[in-house]
């Protein structure tokens, strides 16, 4: 538990940097990193971009796998997670585009797209570090309440609460929010060696309580990480109001 969102961002960025450095990534040995979107990780991305610019860290030998994206939004739509990732992170670091993997919500065969994504992760030897955030209903990626805790990458219909939470990004018009998304499953994230979940703000307080103080429950999918071998949930004070 840290004081403010900025402290969470800095802690997370330093943690990610250390993990990548300790791994000693190189052309023969890529680090595999799972990445989230949303408002919460923005500060972390900014700091990582800063460290990269100052030569403290390189992302050249890091393969990146995004958690999710909406179905049906063109990749250049400002609310697509493709756009988010390039705009907020990738264009500010030393990336090789071939190391960027984002689910394509416009693929003609969405199920195949999801299966191929799992395959790609497997081929890369699994994810070393998966970073995530949570929704106010405790969802991780787009694993909405009721999702199987052994789920894998798939098409998911979004819960009304998620549409409401995300309509701030769509002119506050809920009818503009896509109703489906492609998302990694809970198990896809659980398979990672390390998981780092960032949680800030009082709107996440109830979710945090359910995810760490109540039992493992598919209605609060991030509670599954109680059973993960190495998950760190890093929060600001506001997020801990219900603990
Ligand atoms: C969306 C994303 C999640 C993210 C959540 C919270 O639902 N699919 O991956 O964790 O939003 O976003 P924010 O950080 O903006 O609260």
Image: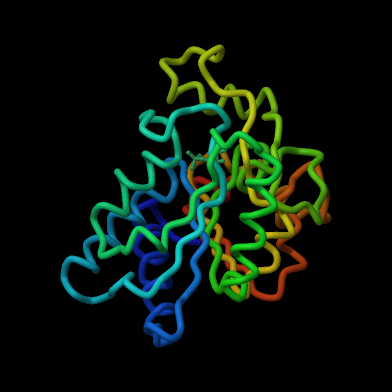
Q: Position of residue 66 (x, y in %)?
A: 51, 53
Horizontal side of 164 relative to 216 (left or right) equals: left
Which color scheme is applied? rainbow
Residue 57 sits above or below residue 134 on the image:
below
Q: Residue at 64% of width from left, 29% of height from top?
A: 180
Q: Residue furthest front?
A: 108
Residue 137 sits above or below residue 66 on the image:
above
Residue 203 sits above or below residue 198 on the image:
above
Q: Residue at 60% of width from left, 65% of height from top?
A: 121
Residue 59 sits above or below residue 175 on the image:
below
Q: Position of residue 83 (x, y in %)?
A: 37, 39
Q: Position of residue 11 (x, y in %)?
A: 39, 66
What is the tally of numbered marks visible in this picture? 0
Q: Nearer the viewer, residue 14 or 157?
A: 157
Q: Residue at 55% of width from left, 55% of height from top?
A: 132
Horizontal side of 213 relative to 39 (left or right) equals: right
Q: Residue furthest left?
A: 54
Within the image, what quadrant is residue 175 found in?
A: top right
Q: Nearer the viewer, residue 198 or 28?
A: 28
Horizontal side of 8 relative to 229 (left or right) equals: left
Q: Position of residue 144 (x, y in %)?
A: 71, 38
Within the image, what quadrant is residue 206 found in?
A: top right
């Amino acid at each position: 538990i840290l004081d403010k969102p900025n402290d969470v961002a800095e802690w997370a960025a330093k943690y990610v940097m250390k993990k990548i450095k300790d791994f000693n990534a190189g052309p023969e040995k890529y680090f595999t990193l799972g990445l989230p979107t949303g408002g919460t990780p923005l500060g972390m991305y900014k700091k990582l971009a800063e460290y990269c610019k100052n030569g403290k860290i390189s992302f050249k030998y890091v393969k990146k796998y995004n958690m999710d994206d909406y179905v049906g939004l063109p990749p250049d739509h400002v609310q697509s997670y493709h756009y988010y990732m390039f705009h907020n992170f990738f264009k500010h670091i030393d990336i090789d585009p071939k190391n960027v993997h984002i689910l394509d919500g416009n693929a003609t065969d969405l199920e195949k797209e999801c299966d191929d994504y799992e395959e790609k992760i497997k081929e890369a030897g699994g994810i070393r570090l998966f970073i995530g955030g949570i929704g106010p209903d405790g969802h991780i990626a787009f694993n909405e309440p009721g999702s199987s805790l052994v789920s894998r990458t798939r098409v998911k219909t979004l819960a009304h609460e998620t549409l409401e939470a995300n309509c701030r990004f769509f002119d506050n018009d809920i009818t503009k929010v896509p109703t489906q998304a492609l998302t990694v499953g809970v198990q896809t994230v659980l398979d990672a060696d390390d998981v780092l979940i960032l949680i800030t703000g009082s709107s996440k307080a109830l979710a945090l309580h359910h995810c760490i103080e109540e039992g493992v429950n598919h209605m609060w999918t991030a509670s599954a990480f109680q059973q993960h071998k190495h998950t760190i949930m890093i929060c600001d004070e506001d997020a801990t109001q219900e603990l």
